[in-house]
Amino acid sequence: MSRRRLIQENVDPVKKIQEDIQKERKEQRRNRRRKFFKRLLMMMFIIVLGVGLYFFDQSEYSKVREIEVKGQKHLPVSYILDNLDINENDRLVEAAFKKYFNKPIIPGVANNNLKLYYTKGLISLTVQEYPVVGYIHDNNKQVLFSDNTLVENPNFMGSDVPKLVNFKSGDLETHPDFADKLSRMETSSFNSISEIHIVEEPLEDIYFKLIMNNGYFVFTNLKNLLLMDYYSDIVSGIQTGNTPENRCIYFLDYGHTPDNQSAVARPCDE
């Protein structure tokens, strides 16, 4: 029998098991120490980061020094800033919170994108406005957007949208779908409207007289306003019919019929 085999046979099995257990426990202690130091380092990193953010937030470098607005066409910058809920000298940390968790909602603005430039103390706001569907020009100019937002803008040039006449305070709030229907109207028909007047009609809650830029007049309630999509066909039918002098168009209360009739034309002196 060889010497090596004698040594192996003389090893105590119990002692071997104890040694294995000790090795396993030592490895477990080593792993626990590693996890402890990892957690400790992570906690120290979080504490240092929190302290750093605190002192940065208290410094002059953390303030909003400038707010830049881009993309606006008909909304005054002052109006947008008033509704932004972020001001110069506010903390950048607070602005960042609003950017990620409390996105600003600005009436008249369909979409907005807020960017923060921490090193410059700059906030850049890019906006996309809702379409303009009309304007009121009494003592001042007020612009109506498709989301039914009415905003004062004395610099507005309203040649591309109809002028709204006789609209009293509360008419738009009572009938918010008026602006929405104007925005959904067929483009060529919408562009043909010069003015929209509210007129008295005993049987209607609200009634409109549309002055068209080609000399015609359209009368309709709010329900049938989108019958304007057939306006070009109606005018074509009048011009080729027996009474081309009838320039006042009245939309039918029951809407567009299967035989393509949407309105009747009458003399305007009735």
Image: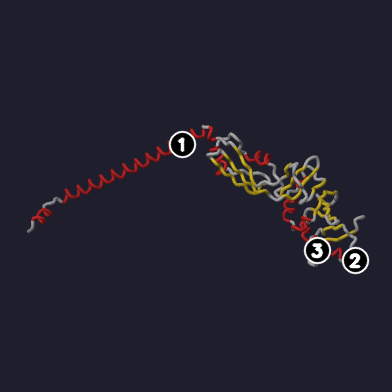
Tell me the element at label 1: helix
The disc, 2 or 3, on the residue closer to the chain's N-terminal end is 3
Q: Which mark is residue 242?
A: 2
Q: Amino acid at mark 2?
A: Asn
- The CA distance from mark 1 to mark 2 is 83 Å
Q: Amino acid at mark 3?
A: Asp
Q: Nearer the viewer, residue 9 or 219?
A: 219
Instruction: Check the image and report above or below for 150 versus 222.
Output: above
The disc, 3 or 1, on the residue closer to the chain's N-terminal end is 1
What colour scheme governs how the chains and residues are painted in the rendered image of this protein?
secondary structure
| Left or right: 110 as drawn, with respect to 242 | left
Kindly give the residue lying farthest to the bottom in the view shown. Answer: 259
Residue hosting label 1: 50
Residue found at x 63% / y 43%: 69
Residue found at x 62% / y 41%: 68
Kindly give the residue lying farthest to the right in the view shown. Answer: 269
Residue hosting label 3: 233
